[in-house]
Image (cartoon, grey):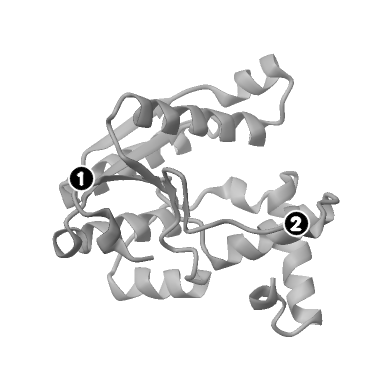
């Protein structure tokens, strides 16, 4: 992504505290003066994992403070929300985040929202859409810029991100729910996709 295109703009990074978003916030902040944009952050405390969720929020707030980045925090109870709306917890949490993003944009607190989606996420998205019956025209993946949403790491692999984290000595949080296969995307990422990549060399890159 050509960051010089966003000179004088406010880019708000969605930071969960995990490796991907922590790396993205650090990367954008590190390049801020070079390209002339302003880096902000937003964190969502979904109320799903109790004290672990609160600990992640505290970590993000502390990390942002260390970088000199203003952070917006949204707290909610997505378990109750899912029950009330008869949605999956996954969907309720995603909608909660989306509403927060839109609020920041509508209230003119940010010009863009940046998420840490990467090459592996892109491949999984295409596979997921095909599995759900999308035609080829509708099975395409994500874009680096989609309206006011940016994905600066979309050409980076997960391995690239972890290498960046190690090189810069960054610490991050581990969300245990990422390893629970009762979530559809988790099951796809943890079981189906690795098997496919093992069976077909280059599957991830081809997707």
Q: Residue at x 76, y 63 (%)?
A: 191
**Vertical position of residue 117 compared to residue 46: above or below:** below
Q: Position of residue 36 (x, y in %)?
A: 16, 56
Decide: marks 1, 2 in contact (CB < 8 A)?
Answer: no
Res. 105 image quadrant = top left
Q: Residue at x 68, y 49 (%)?
A: 180
SS for callout 2: helix
| Marker disc for residue 69 | 1
**Residue 195 placement, left or right of 109:** right
Q: Residue furthest right?
A: 133
Res. 145 image quadrant = bottom left
In-front residue for pair 126/84: 126
Residue depth check, mark 1 versus mark 2: number of the one nearer the observer? 2
Quarter that holds the C terminus: bottom right
**Vertical position of residue 21 compared to residue 148: above or below:** below
Q: Residue at x 44, y 70 (%)?
A: 162
SS for callout 1: loop
Q: Position of residue 59 (x, y in %)?
A: 32, 44
| Marker disc for residue 167 | none
In-front residue for pair 130/163: 130
Q: Residue furthest bottom?
A: 201
| Marker disc for residue 137 | 2
Q: Upstream in the sequence, badge 1 or badge 2?
A: 1
């Amino acid at each position: 992504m050509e960051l010089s295109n966003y000179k004088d703009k406010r880019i708000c990074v969605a930071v969960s505290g995990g490796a991907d978003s922590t790396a993205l916030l650090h990367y954008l902040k590190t390049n801020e003066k070079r390209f002339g944009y302003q880096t902000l952050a937003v964190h969502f405390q979904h109320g799903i994992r109790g004290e672990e969720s609160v600990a992640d929020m505290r970590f993000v707030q502390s990390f942002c403070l260390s970088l000199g980045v203003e952070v917006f925090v949204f707290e909610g109870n997505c378990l109750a929300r899912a029950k009330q709306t008869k949605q999956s917890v996954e969907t309720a949490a995603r909608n909660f985040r989306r509403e927060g993003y839109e609020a920041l944009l509508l209230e003119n607190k940010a010009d863009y929202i940046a998420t840490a989606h990467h090459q592996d996420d892109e491949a999984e998205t295409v596979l997921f859409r095909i599995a759900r019956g999308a035609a080829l025209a509708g099975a395409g993946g994500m874009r680096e810029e989609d309206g006011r949403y940016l994905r600066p790491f979309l050409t980076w692999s997960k391995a690239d991100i972890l290498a960046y984290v190690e090189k810069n000595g960054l610490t991050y949080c581990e969300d245990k729910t990422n390893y629970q296969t009762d979530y559809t995307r988790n099951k796809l990422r943890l079981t189906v996709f690795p098997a496919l990549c093992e069976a077909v060399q280059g599957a991830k890159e081809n997707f």
